[in-house]
Structure formats: C-alpha cells, structure tokens
Amino acid sequence: MNEVKLFLGPQHPGMHGNYSVHMYVDGDIIKKARPTPGFLHRGFEKLMERRYWMGNLALIPRICVPEPDTNEMVYAMGVEALANIEIPEKAHWIRMLVLEMARVAIHLMSLGSIGGPTGLYTATYWAIAQRDLLLDLFEELCGARIYHMYIVPGGVRKDLPEGFTDKVLAMMDELDEKIPEYEDLILKHPVIHARTKDNILLPAEVVWELGVTGIGMRSAVGKEYDLRKVKPYAYYDKVDFEVPTATYSDALTRLNLKVRELYQSMRIIRQVIDKMPSKGAVNVPVSTGSALRWTVPAGMVYSAVESSRGEYGYFIVSDGKEMPYRIAVRGASYPQGLLGIEKYLKGHRIDDASLWMDSMGVCTPEIDR
Amino acid sequence: MNSMNNTINEIKAALKPLKMETPAFRQIAVVVKPDTVHNALSYLKQKGFTQLSIVTCVDWIKESEFELVYILFSWTEGIHIQLRARIDRDKPVMVTATDIFPGAQYYEREVHEFFGVEFTGNEDAAKPLFLEIWDDLPPLRKDFDPQAYSDSKFPMRERGNEFVSEIGGHDDE
C-alpha cells in the first residue's frame, strides 16, 4: 500500500508544548512513529552549572511549565540532603499545602485539556477558568501565578499570609461543588466515551518495559505505587489519603483516576491546614553568609517526588563550591514520551495520536529540558 | 530500616562494590568497576529494583573520567539505588543496558549526544536526538564553552543609525 509521511506538531491543539511526531500512515492507521523532540530544548542542565545555588531557583520552575512546584521541591530536597540540614516543621506542612494545591491545579488543567484532542472545548474553558481561581491564591501567596519560586532550599520563602488558609478552605468547598459538574461534563460525555473507552491501552508489561510511573502505572498495575506512600517525603506519612488504582488501563480509566486523585489532594489539603502549627520558623539557612553565595558540601544525591505524571527526580552533584557541578533532570513523562511513542503509537488511528499524547501525560518541556 | 540494612548487606556481598554509602533517606549509592555494570544491573533487577529512573553522566574533567550513573528504584521496598561507574574520558565506551532495561534506550541516546559516550550494542545510540545539526563538542562536557560557540555561530552585527530610522524608530533630527 501507499505509505504517507505526516507530521504531528510541532504545534497542535492537543499537545502541551511544542513536540513533533513523524507518522508513517497507511489510510487512517499509523504504521510507524518517530518522536522528534528538541523544540523546547533550552539547555537547562548546562545553564544550572553556571549559576549559584540560589540563583537556580529562577530557572527550575520553568523546566516543566504547568508544574513548577514539583521542580522546586525536588531541588530543595536534594540540596537539603547534600547539606544535611533539617527544615522546620511548619515548612514541611506549607510545602505539602503548596504541592497539593499545585496538583489540583495541574489535574484540572490536564483534565480540561482532554478537550483539545477530542474537540470538547467546553471542558477546557471550564477547567482552565477554575484553575485560574486557584492561581489567584498562589499570587497572594508569593506574588506569582505560574512560576512561584516559593519552595526554596531550607524551607519556604515566607510564612503564609494572614487569612490564607481560610481562602484555601473556601476554594476547596467550591471545588467540592464544581468537580462533580466536570465529571458530568467530561467523564459522562458520549464523545469522550466514544474516543477514550477501550482505546489507548497501557498493559502492565508495557509499564514495566518503558518505566512508566504515576497514573499510567497505577491504572495498569493495580498497586498503590505512589512515592508519597512508598517512600514518603515531607509529612505525607502523617496524613490519611488513598491512592486510587485500577487494573485495566484505557484512556477513560486514566481520566477517572485523575478525578479521584483530585478528591484525595483536597482531602490532604484539609488535613494539612488542620495539623499545621500556627507559629514557628519556616526556613533555615543552608549555609553561612549571603544566600546568593551559599556553598553546598560535596556529594551526589538523587531526590524524587510524585508529580502529577509520575516520578520526578533530580540527580544533583556538588563539588563543594558555590554552583552545582552537575544536575540531571528526570522528567516524569520521558519514558512514554520517547520510547513509548516509538514503540506503541503505531497501530492507532491518526486522530488518536494527540489523544495518545494527552492521556499518557506527555509533557514536552520536561523531556527536552 | 531493617530491610534497608538487609539490602545493603546483600548488595555488598553480591557485587563487591568499590564504595558504598547512603547519601539520603532510603537511598544507596554503589560504586562499581565499569566492566561489572551490566552484571550489577541484572542482579539488581532480580532483587526487585525493576524501575530504571534515569541514566546520566558526570564529567570529571580534572581526573579525565566520565562517571555513568544509573538510578534504580524498588517499588516494593521504596529504596533508590545509584549505581555508578567511572570510565576513561578519552575513550568513553560502555555496554548498553537496553537488554535489561529497554527504557534505557533514549537515556543512552541522550548521554551519547551530550557527553559523547559510546554504548556498544545500542545501534540507535549515535542518532541525534535533541540537538539539530550539531557540529561541536558534546555540549554538556565541561570543556565546551557555550559563549564561544554562540559567538562563532551568531556573530555580533553592527547596526548604524540608518537601520533605526528604517524600521521607524527614533528620528535623529
């Protein structure tokens, strides 16, 4: 038959960031797919070697655009492990609050972005609008909507503003009312069902082969493989929450898990606000002298947290100087975004290609870096 | 913590590493000789470290060595392992890990592109990935100078006043 080469991207409404896939198609079916990353390669790893430990804070949130706080958290955890310091109790609680608020924000965004590849744009408008109200809270917290630079090595930058927790709780009450509406709109919509049910399967063997983590892994393996449970950081071992799982992973299952995780994040936020001490320090210095000239003891450490798409990690090397010697970033969607596309996109229809990227949670800035 | 100590002792007995340490909470760093990396990876995978989180490289230019780093994770025990090995910087060659962890494919391509490490057995490792038409040293090596590269590729252009008036900017009169 006649094979035709088609380009998906670098711009496409169903994708997060610029990414290109070369597809060799026969009729409507993809016969071969080649990922072509690099459109968002900004050389972060090299840039970070040439900046001070604190100066890097301006860079790291930009590595994964929709999920800045995860980056700040892994970086801070790694530096703290190298410097061997304990951060104050309240800082742990505030970090958890910020991380879970960020998780709600990104889950809302990725839930709504299912509208891109399926054409259900109402979902996008609703969810992004709701996320914007959450970003207002971040703006009040640290002055920035997207790139917060709030979680720093040694704790968090400043204590919470007065009355902040009440506003967060009010937002949680609002979400309690709103999320069922999104469920009605998205999860029960016939268009979404037609496109996602029994489509884009992710069997457990593929999970292990590629190294997929996060919702993809939990929806296929059926175990609570969440770093917050398996290897708790901050105070995740002091709050109650469930990790939703499934044993049959199609695109609809993964959407369902995303919504169920939203409720769990809100449950964590309420507990955090309940248990957080009202007074106390929120940061400690990592080293002596000006924060811009801190030194970090020599060593190599890998730090990882559970992002919305899976294990997000930094491998940090210090040689005891004022700048990091090397930082390697493990983007959470690296396995499915490169090898996954090469091996498992074939066999799908052309119109499912962008749905494939969306439901597998491919985030291109963290792949390119 | 018991399982952590057990794991450390078992790894010590089986791999006979050059060095072992615990750099962070539930994390073990194991330094081995480069020719035993492949065996160590398959041993660790059998021990339950079924997830390869990242393969990366550190350029120790003063010692003229590259240090390859494999980060593995065990979901049952919740322990991260750094498996590290140093190879010669002038002739950097390592056996591929793709037969044990198929997911290593693209990490090896990345390490090849950014550091110039050859992976024997991985035919695709030498293909370009992120960089387009790259014609200089692998850019994450410490002796690569981004400023010099940028200056040579994008020379400074002198602009006179006529350019400013051409685009409708300032008027000199």
Image (cartoon, rainbow, N blue to C red):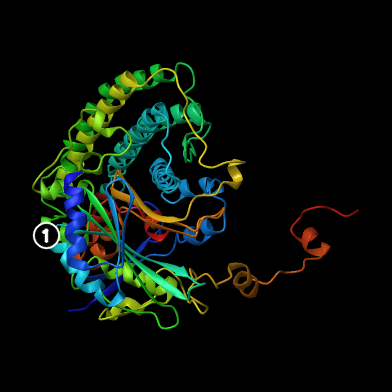
Q: Is residue B101 visible in the rendered structure shown here?
A: no
- Residue A244's spot in the image, x, y percent? 16, 38
The answer to which image quadrant residue A106 occupies is top left
**Residue at figure coordinates x 55%, y 73% from the top left:** B143
Point out the image quarter for the C terminus of chain A: bottom left
Q: Is residue A3 above or below residue A298?
A: below
Q: Is residue A289 left or right of residue B6?
A: right
Please, which residue is most extreme toward the left here?
A247
Q: Is residue A217 above or below residue A158?
A: below
- Residue A299's spot in the image, x, y percent? 43, 56
- Depth check: give the residue in front, A120 or A137: A137
**Residue at figure coordinates x 9%, y 48% from the top left:** A248
- Residue A49's spot in the image, x, y percent? 52, 59
Q: In this view, does A88 lie above or below A331?
A: above
Bin the neighbour count of mark 1 within 10 Å (Cα to Cα): few under 14, some 14-19, many 20 and up: few
- Depth check: give the residue in front, B10 or B129: B10
Identity, as a three-letter code, of the amino acid under mark 1: Glu
- Label 1 marks a residue whose chain is A
**Residue at figure coordinates x 10%, y 45% from the top left:** A222
Q: Name the residue under label 1.
A: A205
- Depth check: give the residue in front, A198 or A216: A216
- Residue A17's spot in the image, x, y percent? 40, 53
- Depth check: give the residue in front, B105 or A81: A81
Q: Is residue A140 visible in the rendered structure shown here?
A: yes
